Amino acid sequence: MGYRKLTRPPDQAIFQLFRYVKVVLLELPDGHIQRALGKALTPDQRRTLQGLGMDESIDV
């Protein structure tokens, strides 16, 4: 059986890549909650988002 190279990673690989991304919740003085990434994404994570048509500014 031959294997083929996928142009888009399977869902499981995407979930695994973002498994340890932390989202920090900040409560603002006016009571609103702001979400932010705990640290910058890795190059692989950024490349995956770009391949999905998204970027780091997605609503976390």
Image: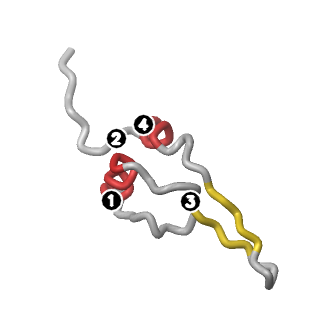
As helix, strand or loop, the secondary structure at mark 3 comes to strand
- Percent x, y of residue 28: 75, 78
Q: Mark 4 highlights which residue?
A: 13
Real-space CA distance between mark 4 and mark 1, rounded to the nearest whole angstrom: 15 Å
Contact flag, marks 3 and 4 (Cβ < 8 Å): no
* Mark number displayed over residue 9: 2
* Residue depth check, mark 1 versus mark 3: number of the one nearer the observer: 3
* Residue depth check, mark 1 versus mark 2: number of the one nearer the observer: 1
Quarter of the image with the C terminus in it: bottom right
Q: Mark 3 highlights which residue?
A: 37
Contact flag, marks 2 and 3 (Cβ < 8 Å): no
Quarter of the image with the N terminus in it: top left
Q: Is residue 43 left or right of residue 56?
A: left
Q: Earlier in the sequence, mark 4 or mark 1?
A: 4
Real-space CA distance between mark 3 and mark 4, rounded to the nearest whole angstrom: 20 Å
- In this view, the residue farthest toward the top is 1
Q: Is residue 40 above or below residue 34?
A: above
Q: How is the image coloured?
A: secondary structure
Q: Earlier in the sequence, mark 1 or mark 2?
A: 2
Q: Earlier in the sequence, mark 1 or mark 3?
A: 3
* Residue depth check, mark 2 versus mark 3: number of the one nearer the observer: 3
- Percent x, y of residue 53: 34, 63
Q: Earlier in the sequence, mark 2 or mark 3?
A: 2
Q: Is residue 43 above or below residue 54?
A: above
* Mark number displayed over residue 23: none
Contact flag, marks 4 and 2 (Cβ < 8 Å): yes
The residue lying at 60 percent from left, 51 percent from top is 22
Q: Amino acid at mark 4?
A: Ala
Q: Mark 1 highlights which residue?
A: 50
Q: Amino acid at mark 2?
A: Pro
